[in-house]
Image (cartoon, rainbow, N blue to C red):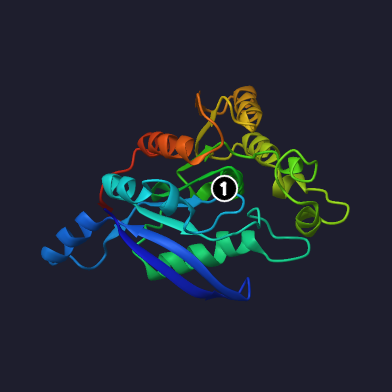
Amino acid sequence: MAAYIHCNFTSKVLRMTVDVSILLPEKTRWEQLESGERRGVRYQTLYLLHGFTGDHLSYLRTSKIERYADEHQIMVVMPSIYNGVYTDMKYGMEYFTYLSEELTDFIERTFPAATKRENRFVAGMSMGGYGAYKWGLTYPERFAAIGGVAGSYHAEYRYQGRVNTVSTLCEALYGDPPAITPEKHDVFTMLRTLKEQGAEIPRLYTCCGTEDRLYSCSEDLKALADELKVPMVFEHGPGRHDDIFFDEYIQRILNWMEFQGGPVEE
């Protein structure tokens, strides 16, 4: 099993203490220590983002991510964004700035996380799938690949009542009346813009259960990728919006990401 670290530190952006769960590959870490190679060891890193109502413990409690991290010999970082939708709120916390600037800097200064684009990955389920695509498409130069499980990719669905988000939270997120800014919040607009700009887009993967209420979100994202001729893997099969489907398909995502399988040189 991977080594588990519960990290609690003060965020200047959020003006509060925050929790992050971190997994490190145990086997390779001990082999490095025994051989005397203690410096310069870094690991390919997956930022794994939780869904609505979740936190940094979500995947530890509902999946075998500890085992999978050790099998792939990767570092996994799971922050708490609570119900912040990976967004700098109109009236509230700047969760996206914390995630994309402060957290990344803290992790890479404090832990043996690899820093090159080809060694950094992001994925998540539901709200976390949206967050993964939002982060990865906002900063495509930072990530090798983006993976989403049953992502709630349509940001506007939140205040249209088409996903489980309370109205008062939507007003705090997007204003009153709530409205998204496409270039900041809409992953469909982001993907189209990157394609038009000729930017290097990370490798893309999405999946969803055929009985999932958010199935059309993945269908829509795949349709746009096909229209733009942007390569995207879309896998689907029997399943609902639950931990059972996530645990099965996060394994597929990890295999698809094709990690090196041990420490990397930077």
Q: In the figure, residue 229 lies in which quadrant?
A: top right
Quarter placement of the C terminus: bottom left
Q: For this rendering, which residue is in front, 36 or 63?
A: 63
| Number of numbered discs visible in the structure rendering | 1
Q: For this rendering, which residue is in front, 92 or 237?
A: 237
Residue 94 vertical placement versus 144 (above, below)? below
Q: Amino acid at mark 1?
A: Gly
Q: For this rendering, which residue is in front, 94 or 59?
A: 59
Expressed as whole percent of the image width and height from the top left, the position of residue 39 reads: 23, 68
| 26 relative to 43 in the view: left or right | left
- Residue situated furthest left in the rendering: 35
User: What residue is drawn where x is 53% and y is 51%?
Assistant: 50
- Say what secondary structure mark 1 lies in: helix
Residue 80 vertical placement versus 122 (above, below)? below
| 239 relative to 183 in the view: left or right | left
Expressed as whole percent of the image width and height from the top left, the position of residue 44 reads: 35, 51
User: What residue is drawn where x is 46% and y is 53%?
Assistant: 47
- Residue situated furthest right in the rendering: 177
The crowd level at tag 1 (other Cα within 10 Å; few <14, some 14-19, many 20+) is many
Q: For this rendering, which residue is in front, 258 or 202?
A: 258
Expressed as whole percent of the image width and height from the top left, the position of residue 258 reads: 34, 38
Q: Which residue is mark 1?
A: 128
User: What residue is drawn where x is 55% and y is 32%?
Assistant: 240
| 44 relative to 236 in the view: left or right | left
